[in-house]
Image (cartoon, rainbow, N blue to C red):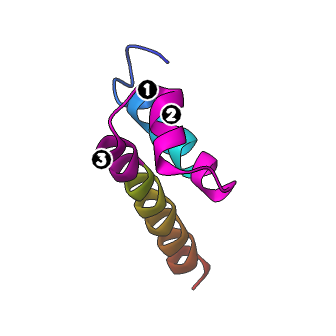
Amino acid sequence: MTDDDPDAHDREIQDLAADMRQRGRSWADIAYELALPQATVKRAAEQAHQRAAERAARTQIALF
């Protein structure tokens, strides 16, 4: 993480939460592991999925 990208830490947490969920971990387990409320880790995972969908859409557009 650098000073050039102040949101890098947030994205890292988002990606981690999404990855843990995809591996079958419960929201409670993820929240405990990341020391965050369950609502926060759910939202973080949603944001990671949204970023991935936007990235895929940009890639798809670039192909045409």
Query: Sequence order check: which comes first, mark 2 or mark 3?
Result: 2
Residue 63 x %, y %: 61, 79
Please state the horizontal and vertical placement of residue 53, each as a whole percent of the image. Answer: 48, 68
Q: Are marks 1 and 2 in contact (CB under 8 Å)?
A: yes
The residue lying at 47 percent from left, 43 percent from top is 28
Query: Disc 3 marks which residue?
Result: 39
The residue depicted at 48 percent of the width and 74 percent of the height is 57
Q: CA distance from mark 1 to mark 2?
A: 5 Å
Q: Is residue 46 magenta?
A: no
Q: Quadrant of residue 8?
A: top left
Extreme top residue here?
3
Identify the magenta region: 19-44
Disc 1 to disc 3, how far (Cα)?
18 Å
The dot on residue 1 is none
User: In the picture provided, is 48 more to the left or to the right than 38?
Assistant: right
Which residue is at the front of the view, 51 or 44?
A: 44
Is 29 covered by the magenta stretch? yes
Which type of secondary structure does the marked residue at label 2 adopt? helix
**Which corner quadrant holds the C terminus?**
bottom right
Q: In the depicted view, which residue is nearer to us: 25 or 49?
A: 25
Q: Which residue is mark 2?
A: 12
The residue mark sitting in front, 2 or 3, is 3
What residue do we see at 49% from left, 18% from top?
1
According to the picture, the residue beneath numbered tag 1 turns out to be: 9
Say which element carries label 1: helix
